[in-house]
Image (cartoon, rainbow, N blue to C red):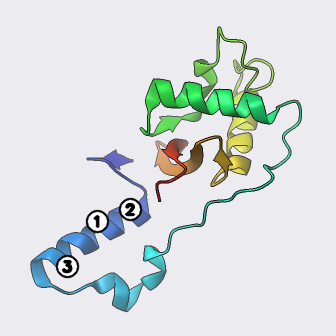
Amino acid sequence: MTLMGISGRREALLTANRITKETTGVDLVDIIRPELKKTSPLKIGKLPRIPSVTESELIRFAELWHSEYGSRSVLTRQLCELTEGTDIQIPPGRCDTRFHKIKFGKMLSKLDGHQIGHYRITGAGKKRNLRLWRLKLADDK
């Protein structure tokens, strides 16, 4: 669920903590759950092996994704539809059945946190029990 730019439990807790800190001066996250402030490190180096998908295709896919949606949260289905009518073969084959959408979602899960070109794919929570994805600039945390 995304509400006013907040998606996911972690982001909601950090926002609530920021409001508490601004109003009372007490930083509860530092006291109770300091692990919330840690960000996952950017995974660089070799990408996970994905059959029949080249790194250059992944980079073109990330650029197309960013030009269409920017850093907004999107559903796997929306990303499947994004490449229709282009020469980008991601996801490999067609994305017209539930099976192919699930397979594509698993491919995105493998790429979660990895740098692809100038971008980083991250999970952005769930909406109606469907996984959301967000593309961020690799420099952003």
Q: Secondary structure at mark 2?
A: helix
Outermost residue to the right:
51
**Residues marked 1 and 3 touching at CB (< 8 Å):** no
Side of 12 where 61 appears, left or right = right
The tag earlier along the polypeptide, 3 or 2, is 2
Does residue 30 appear anywhere in the picture? yes
Q: Secondary structure at mark 3?
A: helix
For residue 83, above or below residue 41: above
Q: What residue is shown with label 1?
A: 15
Mark 2 residue type: Glu
Residue 112 screen position, x and y as percent: 65, 51
Residue 76 screen position, x and y as percent: 59, 34
Outermost residue to the left:
23
Q: Which mark is residue 11?
A: 2
Q: Which mark is residue 97?
A: none
State the separation of the CA atoms marked 2 and 1: 6 Å
**Residues marked 3 and 2 touching at CB (< 8 Å):** no
The number of numbered discs placed on residues in the rendered structure image is 3
Q: Residue at x 63, y 55 (%)?
A: 113
Q: Residue at x 65, y 28 (%)?
A: 61
Mark 1 residue type: Thr
Q: Residue at x 43, y 75 (%)?
A: 37
Residue 51 screen position, x and y as percent: 89, 36
Residue 133 screen position, x and y as percent: 54, 43
Q: Which mark is residue 21?
A: 3
State the separation of the CA atoms marked 3 and 2: 15 Å
